[in-house]
Image: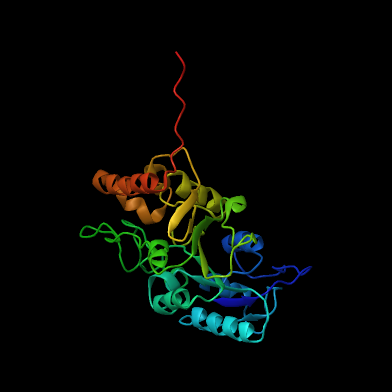
Amino acid sequence: MRALLGRAPGVRRVRPGACGPAPPQGDRKERHHRCRDGGVCMEVFSTPYPETAWGVPPWIHSLFENPAAVASGIEAALKRQGRTEKVVCIGGRRVHARYRGALYQRRFERGHDITYICYDNEAYMNTGIQRSGATPYGASTTTSPAGSCSLGNPRPKKDMPAILAAHGAPYVATASIAYRTTSCRRSSGRSTPPAPATSRCTPPCCTGWGGFESGETLNMAKLAIETGLWVNYEMVDGRVEKAKKVRRKPVEEYLAKQKRFRHLFKPARRDDVIAQIQAIADSNAERFGIDIKRKESSE
């Protein structure tokens, strides 16, 4: 996790020489956000003590549990000093789904002017690919393994953007590394009123999701959106202002490419589970109005 202060004009945000895999999925998004990934996986390979690949000072490396609290304190101190630097806090999916959620939500209740960017790769990837509240329905993980007595994760993915909107968050958005030019206004530098904001981005993990090479990462991210299982949208004062429209593909095209869903296709197809996942995508499409209607052919 990171709490990043301000901008550094003319400074290269990500320096060469990081020891991460190629391509570093988070890095693609970081360059667009003007700040670096605080997701735990990128933490490991981008800042091995005493070195760092990041060129955006100043920054603070907090604990897993408290980045929102640290960022809130920084924002309050800057405000007390009459300073105008923007605070950006970046973390992994744990902040949304588990033990940091309360601190994260308190930030919205208190109205701190902080932009929080969450990298949601849908499991605890760097500690063993364990299930989290962000893991999608039917996915196999090390703590929700698929087998003769289990279909994988039995619970749906937690809708944290909706929970934050219910807390009164004035600006909530989702983003994808597949569509860099359509990211949320706060994290892309466009003007918004001083207030708490959050952006949730999904970077596919070729290790944790399995079944595809790292060079297919962007294609997987695009398929998630094209099937309706991930929706890019902006929500202002609890209302969706815009969402990326797509000509949807069947979810099977997305699921079949990932090892975590392989049990749905062999040794025997689980059409019942695939249909339930398709229903989730259909519900997303209806809720956000993302379907592009095909024009009727003229007679």
Q: Residue at x 64, y 70 (%)?
A: 19
Q: Position of residue 55 (x, y in %)?
A: 71, 73
Q: How many marks?
A: 0
Kindly tell me whether residue 147 is visible in this rendering. Answer: yes
Image position, residue 21 (x, y; %): 59, 64
- Furthest-right residue in this view: 10
The image quadrant where one finds the C terminus is: top left
Q: Nearer the viewer, residue 219 or 257?
A: 219
Could you tell whether 57 is left or right of 93 in the image?
right
Report the quarter where the N terminus lies: bottom right
Residue at point 43%, 80% (across, down): 103
Is residue 269 in view from this perspective?
Answer: no
Judge whether 286 appears above or below 14 on screen.
above
Q: Is residue 269 left or right of residue 177?
A: left
Give 15 or 80, whichever is nearer the viewer.
80
Tell me where residue 52 appears, x and y as whole percent: 67, 77
Q: Quadrant of residue 51?
A: bottom right
Q: Residue 130's image quarter?
A: bottom left
The color scheme shown is rainbow
Residue 76 position, x and y percent, is: 57, 84
Looking at the image, is 15 positioned above or below residue 75?
above
Looking at the rendering, which quadrant does residue 133 occupy?
A: bottom left
User: Residue lying furthest left in this view?
Assistant: 149
Residue placed at 40% from the left, 54% from the top? Answer: 259
